[in-house]
Amino acid sequence: MGYEILQKYGARWYVDAPVMLSAAQLLRSTDGRVLLQAKFRVHTQPVTALSVRIFCRDAFGEPTGDVTGQYPDIVWVRPYGTFGQDMPIALPAETRQIELLLERVKMADGSLWQGGAAVQAVPVPPQQPIDSILTGKQGEILCWYVREKEPDLPDLPRLAGAPSGQEAFWQCWCGACNPAGEACHACGWRLEDETRLAAPDFLEEQAPEWKYDRALATAKGGRAEDYRQAAGLMYMLGDYRDAAEMKKKFTEYAEAQPVYEEAKGLAETGTLACYREAAKQLERIPNYKDAAELREEYLKCAEDLEEQAARKKTVRKRKCLISILIVCVTGLLVAAILLTNYVFIPLYNYNKGIKQREAGEYEASVSTFTDLGDYKDSSEQIRETRYQEAQAMMDAGDYENAGRAFYNLPGNATEYYKDSLEKSMECYRLHAQEYFDAGDYFSARTFITGVPNYKKNSGLYNLYLESAYQEGLQDMANGDYYAAVTLLGLAADADYQDSGEQLKEAKYQYALAHMDAGNTETWAYLEDLQSAGYKDASAQYDRLEGMLEWSATVSIHNGSYSYGHESSVSLTWLNSVYTDIKVECNTSASVSIPVRVVSTFDGDTDTYEDTLSPGGSIQLELSVDGYGTGPSGTYSVRVYNDNTGELIGSASSRVN
């Protein structure tokens, strides 16, 4: 059932009450009923029941009767939890305005809080943006100060706005409302700490130390560019602390670092010349890191290498004489052995491998030819053996292993042996056909996609398309339309049979089964079908649009040259007034809509068009002509859903 928002109400803080009103709105259903939907937030004590009195008035401000509303069956709501948003209260049908009075609240311990007309309800004002108090690098300085200087404070939350205090409550910079004097229930901060640390003068005092720490942290990177950047940061600090000395130190380090790295790189080569050159390089930077110690180490390594070279030269001379004698004695023996090993034995094994293949002993044949190495055409005989082995598998009906054996024949990285590629594709097709004939289309399609370059083989590719087509029809018959869309889409991309028409029907059936404004597939499918003019897709798309629920919050900010972007309830002529209009979305819809922004002032109306996305915002900068003084009046802005013409948000401000 659809609802129309008649009126929205902002947050209210009830002084000394255990709950606050987070938000409320007056709704009218399509059958004419008027409902109040309110959301309450619990403070520190768990709540089990709540009673309110609602004073109702019609469009002319006349009373239509009082209504007592109760939330009697609240599931034990913990501190700072919310309730009520899913428990609407029925009001008289002519109600257009309300006032909400908090009467009684029952706590989990059985105690009862009594309210009534004496309870003061304080509106919670809009929170100023955080950039109204933190400018430039002050946000970074604040994060650094809390982390480094006062680590006992709570972790810094995401800053939603400027902290502000009221007599009964205060708003934390994380956005939460809290009773006066208490720490924030959401992030643990206190108002006095936030006010102290967010003060511009305080942050400006910390800026030099923040820059100094940044320079030291940058230098810890240890690279030449890190030292140069750190030196630049110290230069900007002028005479702060020892910035001048540190700048000089980091500049020297930036020049020494490449020399240091080059010397270490030379030493890693491990040669006598490199050790000497590395020591020579380190002699230029004796005060950098451990350069002096490394220089002594490299000189010692060079001396050790010189001693080793001298000892090896002596040993080589003695071994040379012994080797000459051994060569002469063994020469005759080697000649006899070579004749046997390289002539008679290889020929015998070659013939043995051929006989093993003819007997069907393929592994033994391959092993024999492999041991022969490059003797005659042994490598070619290995390929022939594997070819005949694959043919035997194919003849026996083992198509999967036969296809793999044909495809992986030795040498296939450069060229295929005989017709092994064609036979491998045929074996793969025959194996996939076995799955297909058994009605297992998924296994047939999955197996084919694992075959390299299957699309280049017409037999395999046609069987793949037929498998996807049949599996898609099977999924559609079983009601799995999403899977059917995917599979029929594969076949439709190749224009296979009537898969294009079947794809449209699968999308149509999915949309009917998932008619939900939050389902992105339903939107996409109906848009495609509507463009193709399929059945009543256009009417179904209109039906889907009718399910969307949209609302928007509009705020106006003064953007004058004199005061920058200051939140204003009333705009004052100083120079030419420039106005920022910010529209924020609050909706359950999952798609964007076109919006029309209409601004009116002093009888002039301007219209602007934009697109508002779920959870997003748009911002326009508009101007009202005039310098120094100008016409007075109310500057108003209205935002409409450009699809339906529905008003989804408005705001106004007085210009003096």
Image: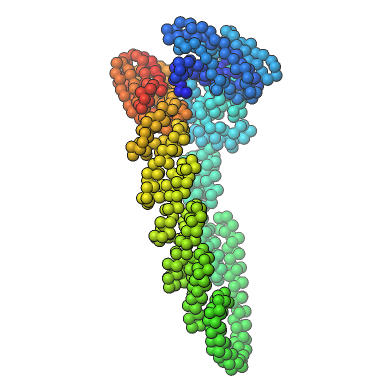
Say which of 416 and 597 sits in front: 416
Residue 319 at what x, y percent from top left?
62, 85
Q: How is the image coloured?
A: rainbow
Say which of 259 and 405 sits in front: 405
Direction top: furthest residue: 62
Number of numbered markers: 0
Q: Is residue 618 left or right of residue 285?
A: left
Quarter of the figure with the C terminus: top left
Residue 465 at what x, y percent from top left?
42, 53
Q: Quadrant of residue 501?
A: top left
Asked if residue 457 shows in the view, the reply is yes
Direction right: furthest residue: 109
Asked if residue 240 shows in the view, the reply is no
Say which of 119 and 40 sits in front: 40
Q: Is residue 225 above or below residue 597?
A: below
Q: Is residue 524 left or right of residue 190?
A: left
**Residue at 52% of width from left, 43% of height from top?**
215
**Residue at 50% of width from left, 33% of height from top?**
139
Residue 99 at what x, y percent from top left?
51, 11
Residue 384 at what x, y percent from top left?
48, 76
Say which of 411 and 613 sits in front: 411
Q: Is residue 571 above or below residue 276?
A: above
**Residue at 31% of width from left, 24% of height from top?**
607
**Residue at 60% of width from left, 92% of height from top?**
333
Q: Is residue 169 above or below residue 345?
A: above
Q: Quadrant of residue 302?
A: bottom right
